Image (tube, rainbow, N blue to C red):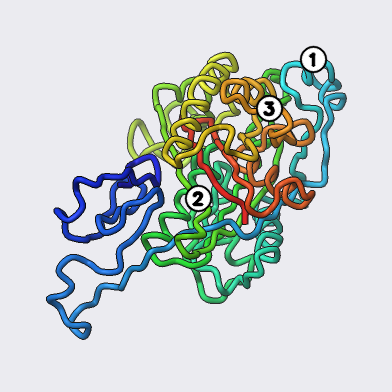
Amino acid sequence: MANASGFFSPSVPSLRGKIKPSIGVIGSGIWSTQRISKRVVCSGTIEGSEKISSSQSQLPRLVSKGCKLVGCGSALPSLQISNDDLAKIVDTSDEWISVRTGIRNRRVITGKDSLITLSAEAASKALQMAGVDPDDLDLVLMCTSTPEDLFGSAPQVQKALGCKRNPLAYDITAACSGFVLGLVSAACHIRGGGFKNVLVIGADTLSRYVDWTDRGTCILFGDAAGAVVVQACDIEDDGLFSFDVNSDGHGGRHLNASITDNEVDHAVGSNGSVLDFPPKRHANFSCIHMNGKEVFRFAVRCVPQSIESALEKAGLTGSSIDWLLLHQANQRIIDAVATRLEVPPERIISNLANYGNTSAASIPLALDEAVRSGKVKSGHTIATAGFGAGLTWGSAIIRWG
């Protein structure tokens, strides 16, 4: 049975023959009492449908479907900022930054770049690799915490891609966990909604929310976009084996960028509000605030647990995976998680040194580079995990190709 944290269906032989074949949805997966396996499945009939003629029934006929990753792409701003460049504006050095974080360079958005253009470029590359035309997309999921419009950026990316059939496009806001949640959402739409081609984009421009006078945070972040195409397939070829997703609002105080009050004066808000009504207009968000020590403790504690949970649901062990691909936040976190999972350095995918923490873009960016370089090959199994503001964290066990 699929539960709220994965596509895992434990064997329940005692229930066979006692429950009529049916379909249900629980949390983040689909379950079927007709077929028990370690994959999410949908039975081909709905309980009671035998009593309704085909002309009477308006319910779609569901069939067992899997999903697989068939294309990836990425895009970066042209401006590169090195640790030495940062040492000119804050009290730091290349050695101080690289030893504590593993970061040496990062890309930063400039006037000619935008979140939309980066996302569209990454998406176009993913579609080209997958051999999918933009008009064949059923859904665009834009995983970002830095949209260029309050109401989201996904439809603008859809427009930039030239999609003529008006596929659904919406944003997912979960910071550095966003891309993993996008993968899970794509799988649910395919398995439960009959979608065939889903574009998942992870993109952020956190440099716009960085306090460039704070050496504790300005050294960490960069801008980028990455994308994958998730496609429906036969259940036997399923490439998303399991997942585990979580959040803890109590930890939000350790990593956030809250709305700030910028009033014209103390009595009248910038939109003409007096006293408490109408509500005052919030002009912007604060810069990123982070308690580095607490975020580190959270990551090295929760991320290995999440991956172990996902591996258990998939019926795999750490030695079964070909690659460990974590959100690129800090090399110390990546190393600590790998040590806990007993994954050797040669099976870790990391490009943190070149790009820093690119939030929701970090996983698809690193995946794209690994695929295009030939490191990740079709059939390889990857344990991936995102973690960050919220606090949110999630992992997925996937197969490439």
User: Which marked residue is nearer to the observer: mark 1 or mark 3?
Assistant: 3
Can I make out residue 129 in this image?
A: yes
Say what amino acid the circle numbered 1 marks. Trp
User: Which marked residue is nearer to the observer: mark 3 or mark 2?
Assistant: 3
- Kindly check if marks 2 and 1 are in contact, taking CB atoms under 8 A apart as contact: no
Q: Residues within 10 Å of mark 3 (few under 14, many from 20)?
A: few
Residue 89 vs residue 357, the one in the foreground: 357
> Which of pointers 3 and 2 lies earlier in the amino acid sequence?
2
Residue depicted at 48% across the width and 30% down the height: 308
Residue 365 vs residue 235, the one in the foreground: 235
The label number, if any, that marks residue 319 in the structure image: none
Q: Residues within 10 Å of mark 2 (few under 14, many from 20)?
A: many
Residue 294 vs residue 244, the one in the foreground: 244
> Which of pointers 1 and 3 lies earlier in the amino acid sequence?
1
**Where does the image place residue 145, in percent across and percent down from the top left?**
55, 41
Say what amino acid the circle numbered 2 marks. Leu
User: Which marked residue is nearer to the observer: mark 2 or mark 1?
Assistant: 2
- Kindly check if marks 3 and 2 are in contact, taking CB atoms under 8 A apart as contact: no
Measure the C-alpha gap from mark 2 to mark 1: 39 Å
Helix, strand or loop for disc 1: helix
The label number, if any, that marks residue 344 in the structure image: 3
Q: Which residue is mark 2?
A: 240
Q: Residues within 10 Å of mark 1 (few under 14, many from 20)?
A: few
**Where does the image place residue 43, in percent across and percent down from the top left?**
30, 63
Q: Which residue is mark 1?
A: 96
Q: Quadrant of the C terminus?
A: bottom right
**Where does the image place residue 368, in percent across and percent down from the top left?**
71, 49
Residue 228 vs residue 253, the one in the foreground: 228
Q: Is residue 284 left or right of residue 215?
A: left
Helix, strand or loop for disc 2: strand
Measure the C-alpha gap from mark 3 to mark 2: 23 Å
Tell me which corner region of the image, top left, top right, bottom left or bottom right, holds residue 156.
bottom right
